[in-house]
Image (cartoon, rainbow, N blue to C red):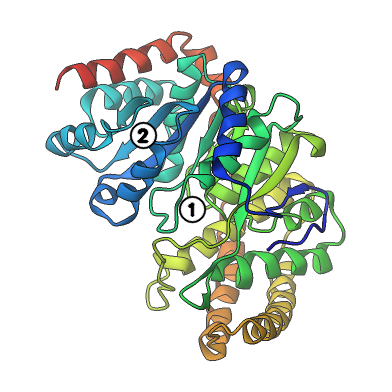
Amino acid sequence: MADFFQNGVITTLHKLRDRPIESLEAELTEFAKERPMALILPSLYSELEGEALPQIIEHLTQARYISDVIVGLDRANEAQYRHAQQFFSVLPQHTHILWNDGERLRDLDRQLYTEGLSPQHEGKGRNAWFCFGYALALEHCEAVALHDCDILTYDRSFPARLFYPVANPTFSFEFCKGYYARIYDDKLSGRLTRLFITPLLRALKKVVGAMDYLEFMDSFRYPLSGEFSLRKDFIKSLRIPGDWGLEVGVLSEVYRNLSRHQICQVDIADTYDHKHQSLSAEDRQGGLVKMSTEIAKSVFRKLATEGIPLSPECFRSIKASYFRIALECIEQYYYDAKINGLQFDRHTEEGSLDLFAQSIMQAGESFLANPMEAPFIPNWNRVLSAIPDFDEQMRDAVAADNASS
């Protein structure tokens, strides 16, 4: 059972009781008359063969307040795309599959490239960006949510609670971030949030001083969650990072574009488990180590835009402060785990701090070597200014792919 404490500068919508899902969905059905909802599922083809996505689809068949499901399908050949059409055909919603590796969408990407607007990196950021553009192209969808396709603990309340804050016409929220306790199989998960981003933000407060941006970021209970919802109008101005800094980069864009009263976070699950990333201690080009480096770079870039001077000496101070604060966090999590009867491997927890501290220095060196790097994909206002009918071309391309089966 959650507490009702409001911390930081962001409104927190707690899960204070087990409200019947039928009651929640009945309200959402009414909201949908004024604010139709579209759910985005950025998916690798391999996730269709996994354990999580079939369960997600089963639950979504009952979420009839959602009018549209937009699937961004990556790493699929034509036979796999055809299989994906069958896989998602059980959904009662209008279902749109963006075959990102298909020739029609690749043609559109080449058109963007000639205008200097094409996403530079393959991956979730690029996939989500195209899906958001397609949601705009549908025109009727007013509330849009996105979540990952590897959630093993998914149920119907998950999308319902995620949509509710931006779908309710009486609420003022333009953006909502999902959060949850990363507790599963009697263990604390969520190392990248617990042991990296939160201690890093608090170290930055000590080194660079109080900043509205750092206070804003530290107000989120799970800043690295892959689940959020937003109003359609905000999509037009939202810039999405194309690298591993997606979640932090999106929050930085939210900070830049929206007022605090337009932003909230909502508790969407009692437990949450998904595909776990390895630490990848031997290879800094993968796993949590790579993710931590990209996340730190994203934060450093934002600090620079806020006028904070960064130097090698500054990064060394950040690293030292981070390490001390992270050790204190481990102590706190140890106590929390013990009173709740959870497993806690202090040796492994502390061992990861050395790697994360190295990520801070590596991110700092990378930033100083290329301070003008622009990882954000252009927003959709810019795309539609350069190519006014691009939304229509997307609709036509997706419809043609589907019709050619």
Q: Horizontal and vertical percent for residue 262?
A: 76, 34
Work out whether mark 2 precedes mark 1 in sequence or the reverse, and give the earlier one. 2
Coordinates of residue 13 in the picture (x, y in percent): 72, 48
Q: Which residue is denoted by mark 2 in the rendering? A: 71
Residue at screen point 56% across, 51% down: 370
Q: Quadrant of residue 195?
A: bottom right
- 265 shown above or below 70: below
Q: Is 158 placed left or right of 84 in the picture?
A: right
Q: Nearer the viewer, residue 154 or 253?
A: 154
Residue type marked 2: Val
Query: Quarter holding the C terminus?
Result: top left
Residue 156 or 245: which is nearer the viewer? 156
Considering the image in quadrants, where does the N terminus appear? bottom right
Question: Looking at the image, which residue is at 69% across and 58% down?
Answer: 221
Secondary structure at badge 2 equals strand
Mark 2 vs 1: CB contact within 8 A:
no
Residue 122 visible somewhere in the drawing: no
